[in-house]
Structures are given as C-alpha cells and as structure tokens.
C-alpha cells in the first residue's frame, strides 16, 4: 500500500512538477519581456 502510494507520488512529481515549473518560468519571462 505505502509503496504504491509512494510510486504514484514520484510519478506525480516527475510529470506534473516540471510542467508547472516550466509554465511558471514562461509566465515570468513573458512578464519580463512586457516590461521592457
């Protein structure tokens, strides 16, 4: 039980987190370019 949950959490982090961070960085860069 615990092992499966841990694997799901790892899968969640490896898939969802990079997309989320990528979107954040893209949004920050976009805001930066608008200010210039």
Image (cartoon, rainbow, N blue to C red):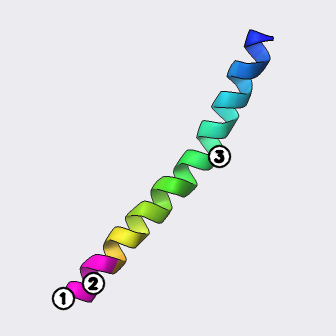
Name the residue rendered at 74%, 21% in the picture.
5
Which is the main secondary structure of the residues drawn in magenta? Answer: helix
CB-based contact (under 8 Å), mark 2 and mark 1: yes
Q: Where is residue 2, by image quadrant?
A: top right
Name the residue carrying label 1. 36
Above or below for 3 versus 13: above
Q: CA distance from mark 3 to mark 2?
A: 28 Å
Earlier along the polypeptide chain: callout 3 or callout 2? 3
Percent from the top left, x then y, of residue 32? Answer: 25, 78
CB-based contact (under 8 Å), mark 3 and mark 1: no
Q: Rate crowding at label 2 as few (under 14), some (14 to 19) or many (20 or more) other CA atoms within 10 Å.
A: few
Q: Which residues are magenta?
A: 31-36
Above or below for 20 versus 7: below
Relative horizontal placement of residue 3, taking residue 36 as reference (left or right)? right
Name the residue rendered at 40%, 71% in the picture.
27
Percent from the top left, x then y, of residue 17? Answer: 54, 46
Name the residue carrying label 3. 15
32 within the magenta span: yes
Name the residue carrying label 2. 33
Relative horizontal placement of residue 33, taking residue 11 as reference (left or right)? left
The quadrant of the image that shows the C terminus is: bottom left
């Amino acid at each position: 039980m615990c092992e499966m949950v841990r694997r799901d959490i790892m899968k969640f982090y490896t898939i969802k987190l990079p997309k989320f961070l990528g979107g954040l960085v893209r949004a920050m860069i976009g805001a930066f370019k608008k200010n210039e």
